[in-house]
Image (cartoon, rainbow, N blue to C red):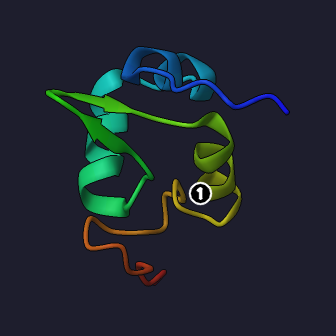
Amino acid sequence: MTTEPWVSVEQVAQHLGVAKDTVYRWREHRGLPAHRVGRLWKFKLSEVDDWVRAGGADDEQDAGGTTARKN
């Protein structure tokens, strides 16, 4: 059985095609799954992908994680 490696913020940003600041913002405000290891944040790409598929990165959400209304 192989285990999935932990990846860095830089690797998640590259995987998703976004800036590192966006990854940090999503972790803080939208619940992007991450695990703190000392001073660093580590991620599992399968958890990140599941979060994206569930709509976690949806632009329709505001910073509080609720869906914004369209007018």
Compared with residue 33, is residue 6 higher up or lower down, i.e. above or below? above
Choose between 66 and 5: the one closer to the eye. Answer: 5
Q: In the picture, residue 14 is in which quadrant?
A: top right
Q: Position of residue 19 (x, y in %)?
A: 38, 22
Residue type for callout 1: Trp
Q: Left or right of 41: which side holds 50?
A: right
Q: Position of residue 12 (x, y in %)?
A: 51, 26
Choose between 16 and 38: the one closer to the eye. Answer: 38
Q: Residue furthest right?
A: 1
Q: In the picture, residue 16 is in which quadrant?
A: top right
Quadrant of the image containing the C terminus: bottom left
Q: Left or right of 22: which side holds 71?
A: right
> Looking at the image, which residue is at 38% across and 23% down?
9
> Looking at the image, which residue is at 26% across and 40% down?
36
Quadrant of the image containing the N terminus: top right
Q: In the picture, residue 64 is in which quadrant?
A: bottom left
> Looking at the image, which residue is at 26% across and 64% down?
63
> Looking at the image, which residue is at 43% across and 84% down?
69
Q: Left or right of 48: which side holds 39?
A: left
Q: Which residue is mark 1?
A: 51
Circle 1: element type? helix
Q: Position of residue 23 (x, y in %)?
A: 37, 36
Callout 1: 10 Å neighbours few (<14), some, many (20+)? some
Q: Residue furthest left?
A: 39
Compared with residue 12, is residue 58 higher up or lower down, i.e. above or below? below
Q: Position of residue 27 (x, y in %)?
A: 32, 49
